[in-house]
Image (cartoon, rainbow, N blue to C red):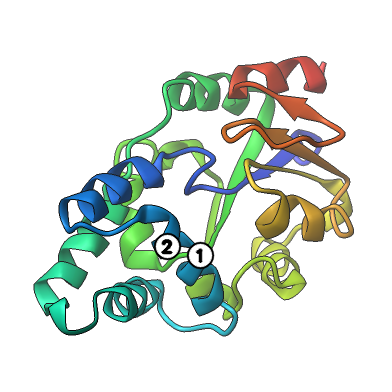
Amino acid sequence: MKNRTIITLDLYGTLVDWKYTINSFLNFLGINPEDFFKQEIEEIKEYKPYSLVLKNVLKKIMGERYKEEYGEALIYYFAKSPPFPDTVLGLMKLKEKARLGIISNTEKRLIKITLTGIEEFFDWIVTAEDTGFYKPNKNAFLKAYEIMGLDPKEVIHVSSYLNYDLLPAEQIVKKTILLDRYGFEWKCKVNNLLEILKILE
């Protein structure tokens, strides 16, 4: 078991489509999703519960229009982000070849909802609530691998994001892989989770 490949993955935007559910709700409220996500990046520089991050960003954008129930609804839609079409089958096949973990910029109560039905694929699930740091802070990775009891130099990390994940992680782990969801370029890129199997051969 110890000799099996170890892969850690980002969750939101990599395995589940958080922008799909959030964008739908923001559009319903008359908010430009791009404005929301730009503000979200600014809000996660220091650790605070991610549910509070979501509410704070919505408050700043909506101003006097904001109501507490809007914030609670946004958290619900975030937590209910659906898997991408390749996610479940990809995890099933990867689990045959590797031990899998998640490193996510969220909190435990939300990730539990998101992973309902697919949590058995993962040997480790670590959130910003566990580490006290948000990615792209390198400490988010270092603390996560410490919690997992892993040597980072034995880990492959997979994400759809360069700035949040791959740029900081490549200085820490054995290998980084871009799962192409948004058209970014990276030295090692796959179009879906199943293509990672070829890299493991």
Q: Residue at x 64, y 66 (%)?
A: 135
Q: Position of residue 65 (x, y in %)?
A: 14, 77
Q: Position of residue 16 (x, y in %)?
A: 43, 39
Q: Look at the numbered discs 1 and 2 and tell me whether their residues touch, using CB distance below 8 Å.
A: yes
Quadrant position of the C terminus in the picture: top right
Quadrant position of the N terminus in the picture: top right
* Left or right, 32 with reference to 145: left
Q: Which is more toward the observer, 71 or 31?
A: 31
Q: Which three-letter amino acid code belongs to the residue tagged 1?
A: Lys
Q: For the residue labelled by badge 1, is the local secondary structure a helix, a strand or a loop? A: helix
* Left or right, 78 with reference to 169: left
* Left or right, 33 with reference to 14: left
Q: Label 1 belongs to which residue? A: 38
Whether residue 113 is visible, yes or no, is no
Q: For the residue labelled by badge 2, is the local secondary structure a helix, a strand or a loop? A: helix
Q: Which mark is residue 35?
A: 2
Q: Residue at x 42, y 21 (%)?
A: 85
